[in-house]
């Protein structure tokens, strides 16, 4: 039923006379919106620490790659702990409306324990809850980055886009990691990344090493800011440049450095 739903959504997206794809005027409005978002200062002194919200789609479609993904994410946390301190909160959704978040912690072992205790369960996506939670947390105390890992999208893109735009104005970029090739998710995740001032990446089972490098780069950004990420990119190279280039374009729209 879930596969049929996604196929139906894809058919409607392609065949509708009024698809939810921005026209030229809407694109201009988005660019103007992004200029405001990019003008918000995000830099910080390297080594001053940071806060990263890590959110996961734990619905049944991700079960085949779940164990491997958890291993990669654990390596990312270990790398982050070597940067001078990074507090992480784990959030996930699954099943019938289940959405849970952990406490903030800088203890890598605790995060690993929490992540390995999560199991997948059939259900629809709840990305809207993730973004609204991030918005509420950001208003209480600054979060430096949101990382989301998922494979599909089954919600209202206009409603989700509105919240993503709020996150952009609040200075919280969303780094959207898309597992697989679902076209609906591709469109939605790219819009969220753009509106929030973040970045989008797609990956599959053969991209393990690339995903690890990209997640580590996000941790560098959350811990040390954009300049720390630039320094990291010069040393790392490879696919990490995609992340830096996307963020640089967002900043460049407002003349940011």
Image (tube, rainbow, N blue to C red):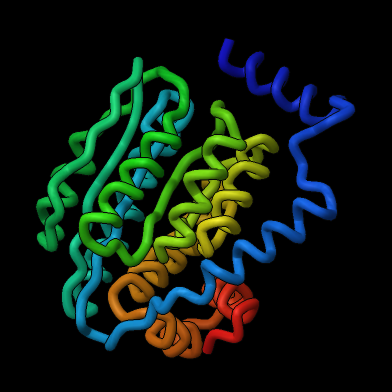
Please give left or right for residue 47 compared with residue 201 in the image: left
Q: Quadrant of the N terminus?
A: top right
Foreground residue, 240 or 86?
A: 86
Number of marks present in the image shown: 0
The answer to whether 226 is drawn above or below residue 174 in the figure is below
Q: Position of residue 114 (x, y in %)?
A: 16, 42
Q: Quadrant of residue 32?
A: bottom right
Residue at the (50%, 49%) spot, across then down = 164
Pick the front one: 222 or 75: 222
| Residue 239 visible in the picture | no
- Rendered residue at 42%/87% (across/down): 227
Query: Residue 96: where, in percent of width, then height?
Result: 35, 15
Q: Residue at x 29, y 56 (%)?
A: 138
Q: Is 134 drawn above or below residue 246 in the view shown?
A: above
Q: Residue at x 44, y 55 (%)?
A: 167
**Camera-nearest residue between 213 and 32:** 32
Residue 195 at least partly seen? yes
Above or below, 239 against 66 in this view is below
The location of residue 116, given as percent across then percent down, is 21, 40
Residue projecting furthest to the top: 1
Q: Quadrant of residue 245?
A: bottom right
| Residue 119 drawn above or below residue 107 | above
Residue 218 image position (x, y, % from top left): 40, 68
The answer to whether 127 appears left or right of 80 in the picture is right
């Amino acid at each position: 039923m879930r596969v049929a739903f996604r196929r139906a959504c894809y058919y409607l997206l392609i065949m509708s006379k009024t698809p939810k794809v921005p026209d030229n005027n809407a694109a201009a409005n988005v660019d103007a919106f992004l200029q405001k978002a990019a003008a918000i200062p995000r830099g910080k002194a390297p080594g001053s620490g940071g806060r990263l919200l890590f959110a996961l789609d734990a619905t049944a479609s991700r079960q085949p790659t779940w164990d491997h993904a958890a291993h990669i994410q654990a390596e990312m946390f270990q790398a982050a702990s070597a940067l001078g301190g990074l507090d992480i909160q784990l959030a996930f959704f699954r099943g019938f409306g289940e959405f849970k978040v952990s406490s903030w912690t800088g203890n890598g072992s605790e995060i690993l324990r929490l992540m390995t205790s999560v199991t997948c369960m059939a259900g629809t996506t709840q990305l809207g809850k993730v973004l609204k939670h991030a918005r509420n947390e950001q208003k209480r105390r600054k979060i430096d980055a949101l990382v989301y890992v998922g494979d599909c999208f089954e919600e209202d893109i206009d409603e989700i886009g509105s919240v993503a735009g709020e996150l952009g104005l609040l200075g919280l970029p969303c780094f959207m990691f898309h597992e697989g090739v679902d076209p609906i998710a591709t469109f939605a995740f790219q819009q969220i990344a753009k509106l929030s001032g973040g970045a989008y990446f797609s990956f599959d089972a053969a991209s393990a090493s690339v995903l690890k490098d990209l997640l580590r780069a996000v941790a560098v950004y959350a811990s040390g800011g954009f300049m720390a990420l630039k320094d990291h990119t010069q040393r790392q190279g490879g696919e990490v440049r995609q992340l830096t280039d996307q963020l640089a374009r967002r900043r460049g729209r407002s003349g940011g450095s």
